[in-house]
Amino acid sequence: MEDRGSSNLLLVVLAHLNLNTPSPRTKPSNRSPRPSLLRQRVTKRHRQQVVALYQSGLSTRMVADQTGVSKTTVLNILKEAAIELRTRGNPNFSKQ
């Protein structure tokens, strides 16, 4: 059997608990979600380097790794420079 004192205490605690009270919200920050250092502009020199590395035979993924930009950025730079993209995979591999 339950002790009456503990059940009364539980009722008092529950009575003070207001579940409809909105939770305190923090003010939205004015900062951008990413630090500005991570999103640097791609300069003309970077674009030339991307094109040169790709034309030297590196894959778009390897160019991205070496230049520090995403693969999508590499593809966009090559597209803007009107560079014809190579097919994926090894062109010397033939199915037998």
Image (cartoon, rainbow, N blue to C red):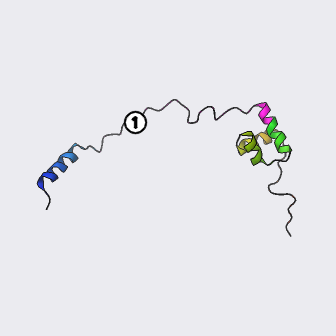
Q: Secondary structure of the magenta portion, mostly? A: loop
Q: Is residue 56 magenta?
A: no
Residue 75 shows in this picture: no
The quarter of the displayed image where residue 20 is located: top left
Q: Say which residue appears at 70% left-offset and 43% top-offset.
A: 70
- Secondary structure under badge 1? loop
Which portion, as a residue range, is magenta?
Answer: 19-47
Check disc 1: other Cα within 10 Å, few if <14, some if 14-19, many if 20+. few
The quarter of the displayed image where residue 64 is located: top right
The residue singled out by tag 1 in the image is: 25
Residue 16 shows in this picture: yes
Q: Say which residue appears at 35% left-offset and 39% top-offset.
A: 23
Q: Say which residue appears at 82% left-offset and 42% top-offset.
A: 53
Picture mark count: 1
Q: Position of residue 92 (x, y in %)?
A: 87, 59
The answer to whether 9 is drawn above or below residue 33 in the figure is below
Residue nearest the viewer, comparing 76 with 10 = 10
